[in-house]
Amino acid sequence: MPSEPLILAFDTSAAHCAAALLSGETLLGTAYEPMKRGQSERLFVFLEELLAHHNARWQNLSKIGVGVGPGNFTGIRIAVSAARGLSLSLGIPAIGVSGFTAARFGEDAESPVALPAPREQVYFSSEGDSAKLVATSEAGEALGLPVPEDLVERIARIAASTKSAPPPAPLYIRAADAAPASDQPPRILDDA
């Protein structure tokens, strides 16, 4: 393995698994697999395949980069949990990167960004506004939606250049579709 820092980045915030492997400034490769469900079962095998393809192992990694959203509630939690677990087990930093930050990387920091969302909508962020969910038609046709492989490469590059950061945390723009349980919580017995 080269002596350059090896950064693995991944994202499952939409209907896909996407990953990139970066050695120093050199992109070794990206992988992308569309999937509506099953990211939790597929993610680690998917990442191991990318590492093996480039003769790398988990122990060779210097940093983890992870997409923290916005996107699918469950998909975001899968990626963030995996990154935090890898960080703890490997003793390396995990850097969370929002899709908006990744889309703007190398571009005008004030430029509007639209990221794919379900139901004919996009997650939209523009200068001075907080991120919101809007109809695709409201975002403007000139905004083209970023390609997942490009975003995950940018996540890797941002992670590589970030010295330190708090553990990754999900970025949610809308509430989860799931409703809280209507059952009464269990009674906790105290041993005292």
Image: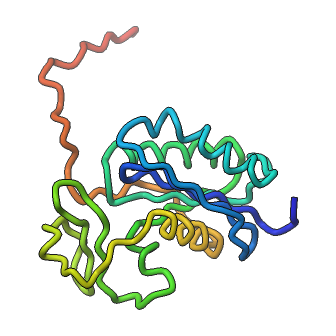
- If the image is split into quadrants, where does the N terminus sit? bottom right
Instruction: Give the percent coordinates (x, y) of residue 35.
Output: 41, 44
Against 97, residue 172 (above or below) is above
- Relative side of 11 to 142, left or right: right
Against 77, residue 108 (above or below) is below
* Residue depicted at x 13% and y 73%: 137
Of residue 44 and residue 185, the one placed in the foreground of this image is 44
- Relative side of 174 to 37, left or right: left
Against 79, residue 188 (above or below) is above
The quadrant where residue 164 appears: bottom right
Looking at the picture, the colour scheme in use is rainbow
* Residue depicted at x 51% and y 85%: 106
Of residue 125 and residue 41, the one placed in the foreground of this image is 41
Against 13, residue 165 (above or below) is below
Instruction: Give the percent coordinates (x, y) of residue 111.
Output: 33, 87
- If the image is split into quadrants, where does the C terminus sit? top left
Instruction: Give the percent coordinates (x, y) of residue 18.
Output: 51, 55
The quadrant where residue 183 appears: top left
The quadrant where residue 145 appears: bottom left
* Residue depicted at x 42% and y 66%: 98
Of residue 172 and residue 15, the one placed in the foreground of this image is 15
- Relative side of 66 to 134, left or right: right
- Relative side of 100 to 105, left or right: left
* Residue depicted at x 50% and y 70%: 150
